[in-house]
């Protein structure tokens, strides 16, 4: 019994450590250290895609808990959100640095005003990448050493939360088994831009459903396209690639995000904030999944 208990605890400890957390902010290559870093909401553990979890405070930046300090940025700056599997001082022998290779899936970046505390219709999607030419966003994330690069949009001056999110799909063929990881940077935009968080903003606590096509998804099924869940990247705020919301990889048809062309099967064809093609290819019909996402199926 003692041996069995010891082995169980050892395995549990290994599983608890086999993930990733947001740990550092860099601006144009210059490190700000941990200033302004809100770590993951669920320590080094995944947020599984159950209905309760997806509606919980874990989806907000560290449950809405502030940290001291902000990092000053300007429109056009390249902000790098650095993630690690464990403490980076653990050395180069960690085969799961920055995340296990099995944890394939999309990476999404959102922004909200700090005053909103991330609650309610506060979040604008500014960047997303999914499956592109057989390569997942997480594959590129691993190759970069855990870096998520974000170009700051032309935001109005003020304090913001910059939220990066990884959705690991290695077990997502089962309902409630996709793994969400998030972390937020507290930033202050010092330039005077024209973009404001407006009526197209989403509530991060109801933007995803456990049955969304991009949350309940079998990565081992040989699909060449992937529907990134949630709304489209808001017009003027950022970029999309590798599927979903009019990006490359089969979800934008020939239009690549414009209003013309047709959408491939399993691609996005509508939803709040979506500005891409709405006509599905022959044999597919545009079906509403939720207020933020309609899919050709």
Image (spheres, rainbow, N blue to C red):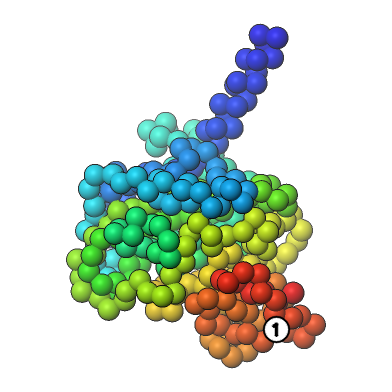
Task: Name which quarter of the figure residue 250 lies in.
Answer: bottom right
Residue farthest top in this picture: 2
Residue 259 left/right relative to 147: right
Q: Position of residue 175 (x, y in %)?
A: 70, 51
Where's the N terminus, which quadrant? top right
Q: Position of residue 189 (x, y in %)?
A: 24, 64
Task: Name which quarter of the figure residue 208 lies in.
Answer: bottom right
Q: Position of residue 91 (x, y in %)?
A: 42, 33
Residue 78 left/right relative to 204: left
Q: Residue at x 40, y 64 (%)?
A: 122
Q: Is residue 24 above or below residue 129?
A: above
Residue farthest bottom in this picture: 260
Q: Residue at x 72, y 56 (%)?
A: 218
Which is nearer the eye, 20 or 136? 20
Residue 52 left/right relative to 38: right
Which is nearer the eye, 144 or 86? 86
- Pointer 1: residues within 10 angstroms few (<14), some, or many (20+)? many
Q: Residue at x 62, y 48 (%)?
A: 50
Q: Is residue 88 above or below residue 255?
A: above
Where's the C terminus, which quadrant? bottom right
Q: Is residue 170 above or below residue 16?
A: below
Residue receiving disc 1: 280
Q: Is residue 69 above or below residue 18?
A: below
Is residue 2 among the parts visible in the rendering? yes
Is residue 142 among the parts visible in the rendering? no
Q: Residue at x 56, y 82 (%)?
A: 276
Indicate the secondary structure of the residue bearing disc 1.
Answer: strand
Residue farthest right in this picture: 283
């Amino acid at each position: 019994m003692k041996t069995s208990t010891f082995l169980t605890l050892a395995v549990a400890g290994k599983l608890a450590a086999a993930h990733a957390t947001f740990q550092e902010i860099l601006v144009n290559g210059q490190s700000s250290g941990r200033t302004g870093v809100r770590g993951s909401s669920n320590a080094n553990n995944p947020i599984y895609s159950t209905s309760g979890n997806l509606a919980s405070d874990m989806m907000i930046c560290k449950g809405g808990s502030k940290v001291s300090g902000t990092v000053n940025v300007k429109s056009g700056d390249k902000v790098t959100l650095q993630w690690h599997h464990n403490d980076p001082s653990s050395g180069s022998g960690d085969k799961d640095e920055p995340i296990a290779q099995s944890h394939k899936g999309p990476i999404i970046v959102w922004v909200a005003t700090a005053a909103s505390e991330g609650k309610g219709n506060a979040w604008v999607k500014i960047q997303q990448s999914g499956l592109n030419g057989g390569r997942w966003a997480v594959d590129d994330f691993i190759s970069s050493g855990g870096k998520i690069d974000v170009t700051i949009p032309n935001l109005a001056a003020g304090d913001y939360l910059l939220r990066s999110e990884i959705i690991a799909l290695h077990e997502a063929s089962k309902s409630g088994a996709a793994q969400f990881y998030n972390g937020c940077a507290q930033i202050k935009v010092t330039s005077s831009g024209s973009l404001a968080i407006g009526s197209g903003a989403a509530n991060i606590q109801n933007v995803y459903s456990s049955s969304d096509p991009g949350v309940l998804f079998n990565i081992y099924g040989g699909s060449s396209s992937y529907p990134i869940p949630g709304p489209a990247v808001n017009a003027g705020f950022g970029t999309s690639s590798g599927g979903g919301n009019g990006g490359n990889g089969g979800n934008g048809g020939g239009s690549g995000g414009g209003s013309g062309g047709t959408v491939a099967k399993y691609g996005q064809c509508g939803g709040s904030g979506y500005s891409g093609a709405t006509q599905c290819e022959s044999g597919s019909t545009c079906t509403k999944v939720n207020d933020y996402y309609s899919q050709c199926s």
